[in-house]
Amino acid sequence: MPETISQQALATLFTEARTHNDWLDKPVADALLHQAWNFARMGPTSANCSPLRIVFVKSAAAKARLKPTLMEGNVEKTMAAPVVAIFAQDSRFFEHLPKLFPHTDARPWFDGPGKGEVARITAFRNGTLQTAYFMLAARALGLDCGPMSGFDNAALDAEFFPDGRFQSNFLCNLGYGDPAKLFPRSPRFEFDEACQVV
């Protein structure tokens, strides 16, 4: 049984972590993004399918391509973020299963006549799961996160994934948030409001 992590680690990941909208003018090293990925990729997915694909938008040119796809209220904070992660899923993730799940032929579970909806749901569910792993990894490494929807998925996909294989899920601004500009934390459900033990 793994040991419980420290209270400080739990605070970093959960109780003290916040969604940031304002960013300090401090760059994020590519090496840190590599580290976050190397932790996040270890989280479990169905048949180790690993459908998450990420485009890290950092340059002014890439941000200029992203900007027209954003809702007006998300433009300023997104353009100010040191990095914007486009989280997407690979609709043909099953092509990689011989490498990722080599002990059995899992590709037919998702590829073939009548399997399109199973593949779509699997890619979306597991890609979303992997984004949560990534954000926790980023927090563990000292980065702040600002996940958001509020953009035109079709326009973004046409710009960044024109061949149609990848589909965007949501965006996450990454960097070092300005704690002075945080809103008060919103309420959360108590256990008995959201959970049952049966």
Image (cartoon, rainbow, N blue to C red):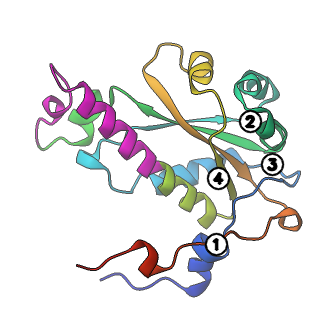
Give the foreground label among 4 and 2: 2
**Cα gap from disc 4 to disc 3, whole angstroms:** 11 Å
**Cα gap from disc 4 to disc 1, whole angstroms:** 31 Å
Which quadrant would the C terminus be assigned to in this image? bottom left
Magenta-colored span: 104-130
Give the foreground label among 4 and 1: 1
The residue that label 4 is drawn on is 32
Q: Which mark is residue 27?
A: 3
Tell me if mark 1 has few (under 14), some (14-19) or many (20+) residues whose alpha carbon lies within 10 angstroms of its own.
Answer: few
Amino acid type at image mark 1: Pro
Tag 4 secondary structure:
helix
The residue that label 2 is drawn on is 58
Asked where in the image residue 11 lies, by quadrant, the reply is bottom right
**Cα gap from disc 1 to disc 2, whole angstroms:** 33 Å
In-image side of 186 versus 90 (left or right): right
Q: Are marks 4 and 2 in contact (CB under 8 Å)?
A: no
Give the foreground label among 1 and 3: 1
